[in-house]
Amino acid sequence: MAVDDDPGSEPTDSNKSAWSVSRLNDEIAATLEAAADRFPTYVVGEVSDATAKGYGTFFTLRDVDGEETIQCIAWSSFREQFDAEITEGEEVIIRAQVDFYTEGGRTQLNVRDYWPVGDSERSQELEALRSKLDEEGLFDPDRKQPLPPFPSNIGVVTSLTGSAREDFRESAWGRAPGVTLTFFGATVQGTNAAASIVGSVRQANRDPDIDTIVVTRGGGADDTLWCFNEEPVVRAIADCATPTVVAVGHEDDETLAEDVADKAAMTPTDAGIVATPEMSTIRERVDTIERRLQTGYETVVSEQLDALSRRIENAVVGLERAAETRQARLQRAADLEQRIDTAYTTLTGSRLDAVDDRIETALQEIEHIAETEAVTVRAAQGRIGGLETRIDRAYETYVDQETEALERRIEEAYRDIETDTDVQEAKQEARQLRIVILVLVGLLLLGVALWAGGFL
């Protein structure tokens, strides 16, 4: 039906012929009731998103080979007669009739009986993946990281248009108004959801400013939450170096992503509580700690001041005693110095007198020795003079005698030479004799000089 864009136009005949919602829903109900024989009595599908109430159980029946779903209700009067419990993930056959709820304008199956036909293919895949991840240790509690108690920046992977974003923000800022929230938009259902979630999780993990990563979305049927069971999403969350929180759906929803996360929360609101500290409680604790610290500080300071005062008093007394001891030692030192001065003066005077006496005695001895030596020198000089005269005389006598003897020998030699036929030989001998005479004279003079030196 076309809608006039001009708000000022007048109603037309088509407006007057338009049906009300109530009339439309009544007509749909009547048409379905009239065509009841066209619908099958039994329907096969996979159970998901089951919610039990006192008056009945609501669940979604998903096509085994596709993504199509239809809502079902099993009223308590029929549910109590079923041979099996309504269990999510089971492939079942139900006996039901098509029912149209006119007040809500929705179609659902009114279930009269229920039979499981075995685990569905998707359930088998889920259990196989769960076993595989469990064997790898991805569900091991020891590998889970603790969440930072006071995060400054929380990275949130969720749809930017869903209610989960606002629920988480309201919850987180209600507890910790100063925390920064960085949103990483992701498609959280449909065929492209897994790749979108993986990309956003990895982007958040690479951001060095992010302290905690929260992956969340609101509730929905199991088939719409299935992307959080897909292996790439589960491994991306498990590989995060940054602590992770996963909150998917409502309280009864459970996914593999929540199992591998460091912390699981029931809802986006609960994720805000899990990921942030309660600042009001912390403030109260801080106030309590401050009071305790103040009391403890005052007590400790008082005790320390008292102890310090005692130590100061003891120190003053000790200093006074030390001063008295020092003064006594100074007095003793002064007395000792006086005694030393007196003893030094006395000892020095006596020793100087003794030295003077020794010096005087030594001088007298030296003078006596000098006088004695002078007399001795004069006597020696007289003796030497007499000796020189005697030597001179002896020398002259000796030389004269020797000269005369030599002359005689020369004369005799000349006479012998003259008688000798070989005059040349005589001359030669005469020359040799002269040389000998000269040598003897030199030796004689040398001997006289040496003899005279012995007396000196």
Image (tube, grey):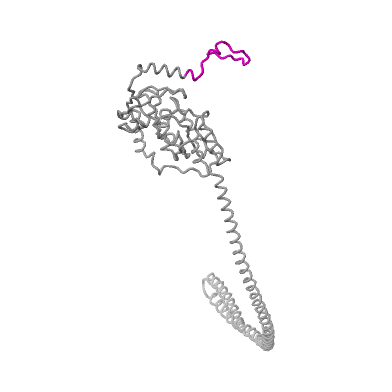
Q: Position of residue 327 (x, y in %)?
A: 67, 77
Quadrant of residue 264 within the rendered picture: top left
Q: Main secondary structure of the magenta part?
A: loop
Task: Using the image as rendered, state which of residue 30 and residue 248 is in the foreground.
Answer: 30
Task: Using the image as rendered, state which of residue 239 and residue 123 is in the foreground.
Answer: 123
Q: Position of residue 159 (x, y in %)?
A: 50, 29
Task: Using the image as rendered, state which of residue 210 and residue 405 is in the foreground.
Answer: 210
- What are the residue bounds of the magenta stretch? 1-24
**In the image, is residue 7 part of the stretch drawn in magenta?**
yes
352 to 283, vertically: above or below: below
Q: Is residue 378 visible?
A: no
Q: Position of residue 152 (x, y in %)?
A: 55, 41
In this picture, residue 398 sits left or right of residue 226: right
**In the image, is residue 248 part of the stretch drawn in magenta?**
no
Identify the residue at the far top of this view.
Answer: 13
The quarter of the image holding the C terminus is bottom right
Q: Is residue 424 visible?
A: yes
Task: Using the image as rendered, state which of residue 244 and residue 352 is in the foreground.
Answer: 244
Number of labels in the image equals: 0
417 to 369, vertically: above or below: above
Quadrant of residue 443 within the rendered picture: bottom right
357 to 271, vertically: above or below: below
Q: Position of residue 26 (x, y in %)?
A: 46, 19
